[in-house]
Every structure is written in structure tokens, then in C-alpha cells.
Amino acid sequence: MLDAILDALLDSVKLVPFLFMTYVIMEYLEHKTGDGTRRLIKKAGSFGPVIGGLLGIAPQCGFSAAASNLYAGRMITLGTLLAIYLSTSDEMLPILISEHAPLEVILKILLAKAVIGCLAGAAVDFLLRRRKQEEHNHIHEICEHEHCHCERGIFWSALTHTAKITLFVFFIGIGLNIILYFVGDGALSNLILNHRILGPMLAGLVGLIPNCAGSVVITQLYLQGALEFGGAMAGLLTGSGVGLLVLFRVNPDRKESLRILGLLYGIGVFAGILAGLAP
């Protein structure tokens, strides 16, 4: 147990400088481009799902939460909302960068999420015949829902994110080390998470956790070899950060919010299964 804790602690400490620098860059980009991005999404019209899917992969603080507010105000379509949910990276990108994942792996995941988000969002809008949406007069400030401490400056926000994610990585590392200790190095590859069908279904549920925990868990399991690409994609596609939490808070139609949650889960799992079957 002591070795498991020490190994997890060392692995977590090694990530701190990389995580911090990554979050500083992300916060800077968010402060410089956040308002412009949201204005672009609102004015996207029929190209909303494509633009939303492409912008969703950019590392931005609370972009999915902002999209939830825009949808609740009927300023974007359902397809655009789903495209952003499916493509948004949440904490995945900082973890991949900090763990020195190969560039081709990072690009593969980001491209897959963007393509799936664009196609799924466009299909949803097409099937729903893009009902005309009325604008809403007030959009809540994203920092109020995201609790990202944006008002306290870039470095404080980056430090807060770094501390939170380091703790997640630490506890996940302890759990994985304990599994390896008791059941052997081959245990991770034999978990139900690697099942072609059940793996994506379970990972998709983990991804729905409405905070950064879901994407941290999925990314770490994938990097540790406990989760195959299909399962990882399912979890990362359904992982929209606090987007769903904000949607249930600001959207007056709770049944609609539940349908959106189910649609997000279904698309994510289906795409994950297909990704797992691909050569």
C-alpha cells in the first residue's frame, strides 16, 4: 500500500509543472478569445454544428457550459449544442500533454471528436428540421457556473485547475497501482472496460460525470492501458465537463434536458463502439 501511494505521489508531482504551464496557456487563450468564440457560435446559423464541433476541441474554460446557456436562451440549435458537447476536450488535453502522450495520439483523438461532433450535430439539426429558435435576452456569466475563478486572474485560475487535477490523478493512480499489486500486470487488459460493447457503455457513463473527474478518469485509464480506444472515445465524447450540469440548471424544460443527456450518451457510445471495431 505504501509503495502504491508513493508511486502515485511521484507520478502526480511530475505532472505539476506541465499541467500548470498548459493551464496558463489555456486561460490566456480563453481570456483573449472567449467572448469572440461565443459571438461566432451565436451567429453561425446553419453552420453552427460544424463551427461548434471545430471550436469545441480548442482548450477553453467552460465552453460547454457557455453553450448550455446559449441553448437555454435558444441562441443556438440542438445540433450545435451536441456538437460542442461531443467535441469539447475538458481536462483530456492537459492530461495527455502532461503525460507526454505521442502527438499523433493527441491529434487522432481531437480529430475524431471534432468529426463526430460535426457530423452528429448536423444530422440532429437535419432530422429536427432546425426549428426556428427565439433569442433570449440574458445569458448568465460562465464563471458563475464554472467556478473557474476567472475573475481572480490567469495564474490563480491555472493554479486552481492544476491542484484539482493533480489530486484526481493522485487518487486514480493509487487505485490503479493497488489493482496491479493484487491481481498482476495483466489485470488491466482483462477488465470489462476492454470489452468491445460493454466497455464503451460503461465508459460513456463515466464520461457523463458533470465535472472534470470523468475526463480525468477516462484519459488516465486509456494511458494506463486499462481502456481501449473505443471505450476511451465513448467516455471522452460523452464527457462535456459541467455543460450538462449547467443545462439542467438553466434550461426550464427538464424533460428536454433528459432527452439531450440520453442523446449525448447514445451518440457517444455508438461512436465509441464503431471506433473500437475499426482496424
Image (cartoon, rainbow, N blue to C red):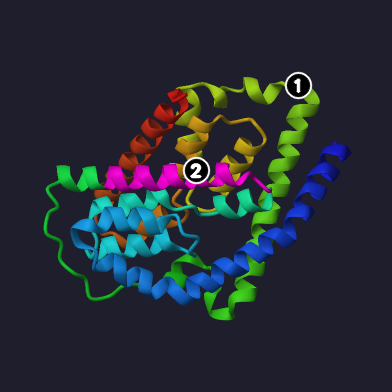
The label nearer to you, 1 versus 2, is: 2
**Does 151 sit left or right of 65 as displayed?**
right
Magenta-span inclusion, residue 103: yes
Residue where numbered disc 1 is placed? 183
Corner quadrant of residue 149 = bottom right
- Say if 144 sits above or below 274 in the image: below
Residue 156 image point, x, y percent: 64, 74
Residue 141 visible at all? no
Q: Which residues are magenta?
A: 100-121
Residue 260 visible in the shown view? yes
Q: Pick the residue in front: 130 or 245.
A: 130
Report, in whole angstroms, how far the alpha carbon at label 1 lies from the one at label 2. Answer: 30 Å
Q: On residue 109, which mark appears?
A: 2
Report the residue that reaches farthest toward the right: 2
Taking the image as shown, residue 93 lies to the left or right of residue 261, namely right
All told, the count of numbered labels is 2
- Which amino acid type corresponds to the residue marked 2 in the rendered image? Ile
Mark 1: which amino acid?
A: Val
Q: Is residue 195 above or below residue 100?
A: above
Circle 1 Cα neighbour tier, 10 Å, few/some/many (<14 / 14–19 / ≥20)? few
